[in-house]
Amino acid sequence: METSENMSLPGKIKLFPNEDNQDKNICQLFDQDIFKTEKEYQEVEEKLALIELREKLEKGVGEAESYLIEKKIRPTPQLVITLRQLGITQKRLAYQVFHVSERTIRNLEYRAKNPKKEYKKRGRPLKITGYNLSLLKTFINPKDKRNEITKTQQEAVEEYRKIGLDLNQSTISRTLTREKQTGKVGTKEYYELNIEKVKQFVLDNYWLYSYSNCFSLDEFGFYANEVHRFVYSRKGCRAKKIQVGEKGTRFTVILCVQNIAEQGKFKVGYKTIKNIRKKEKRNKSKILSKIKNNKDKEKEKKGTTAVDLHDFIERINFPDDSYILLDNAKIHHAVKSLIKENRLPIKDLAVKKGIILKYLPARAPMIQPAELFINAVKYFIKKKLKEFIGKKQLPTDEEVENIIKQAIEDLEKRDLTKTFLHCRDKLNVKPNYKSGK
């Protein structure tokens, strides 16, 4: 009885014709030819092809030529030398059998007669090989990117010159292309990130990313004149991004998204905050007069404050047993600034509303679903703001509010659960339920 290991190895089954019924073939018992390596299998295949060819040659050279033409067999040194021994000329092999140049047949015949000779390879000789090639990879793409800084091509040239190897930047570029090392826009990874803590957080809260009452909260901002960063241009030509010179008003949006696919009571909540920045003149006398007269006009406002976040969470009717994923921004832990404004701290407000706050590890945006939702919303907003560039004007506050509303409506049409699961599976971490972990 053959083992399961042998059964998985490639072999050959021999079929023999049935004398009674010519249409059917019967299988005769045999010792299966098992090949342990791919090389052994290929060698046997080549031998079988040569045996079949010799059988054809016994019938006649003409039939052998037609057989080669039909099968479209590539010329090899062994095959060419075998045919030449039968008296077939190089010219006939080249133009009638293999359809290659006569020089190719001569070279193959020469290689068959001199198998041990080392032949010169095509193309320019390699300047960076062996240890120097491994050294180049450590310069350009180090394994430990936290402790080793990636070097540019010119810096790699300078490092080689220190060890006595005179190279040019073009040589470095060609070598990297040959080794399939390409320059790309890198994904951000912060130095403060503790990847082990992030993986442990995902393991501890694995179920939470598929829980329908799980919410993801974060903030983002944009200017009224923003357009897409990437544009197309011909190769070798500079790409131009056209936008209005004036920045315009900056808006901040608080976004909270629920982990559900269909339309629910909440699904996506947001709050738009218009930033206000006062432009003070450099005239000292006017500044002093303002201080004396206590003329407080519109207060300056930059970004999202703890009060904005408090009021946003307070007005949302969260379902029972809700969880909120949020990062470690200062306003998410605010206490003193809220007490001054006669409001509850964020954590006390969460207890009052019956929700549980889950703070992500530091510098871990890859497991925060709100980051991906923000990218989708900002892409939609920039696409709409681009329409105002042709008019050479900035959108009004009402138009910006309308664009944000459209972006949120577009987000609500999507299956939001896929994004939560994508963040959960980003680090390829899965709990081992069999061991109880």
Image (spheres, rainbow, N blue to C red):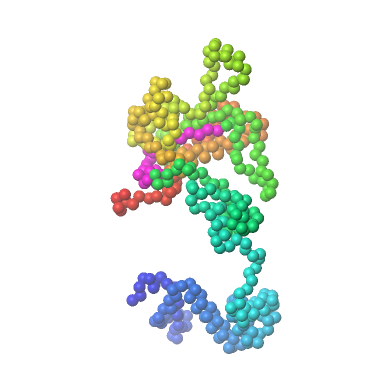
| Residue at x 65%, y 55% (from the top left corner) | 168
Query: Which corner quadrant of the image does residue 25 belong to?
Result: bottom left
Q: Looking at this rendering, what residue extends furthest in the top direction?
A: 293
Say how many tags the image has: 0
219 magenta-colored = yes
| Residue at x 57%, y 22% (from the top left corner) | 278
- The residue nearer to you, when weighing 217 against 340, is 340
Counting from the top left corner in percent of width and height, residue 28 is at: 41, 82
Query: Which corner quadrant of the image does residue 194 belong to?
Result: top left
Q: Is residue 421 visible?
A: no
Counting from the top left corner in percent of width and height, residue 286 is at: 60, 14
232 magenta-colored = no
- The residue nearer to you, when weighing 435 against 118, is 118
Q: Is residue 43 left or right of residue 160?
A: left
Q: Could you tell me which quadrant the N terminus lies in? A: bottom left
Q: Is residue 18 above or below residue 374?
A: below
Q: Is residue 283 visible?
A: yes
- The residue nearer to you, when weighing 424 against 28, is 424
- The residue nearer to you, when weighing 401 against 18, is 401
Q: Is residue 11 left or right of residue 404?
A: left
Q: Looking at this rendering, what residue extends furthest in the left direction?
A: 436
Q: Is residue 89 above or below residue 3?
A: below
Q: Which residues are magenta?
A: 198-222
| Residue at x 61%, y 52% (from the top left corner) | 158
Counting from the top left corner in percent of width and height, residue 213 is at: 37, 38
Counting from the top left corner in percent of width and height, residue 147 is at: 49, 48
| Residue at x 46%, y 72% (from the top left corner) | 37
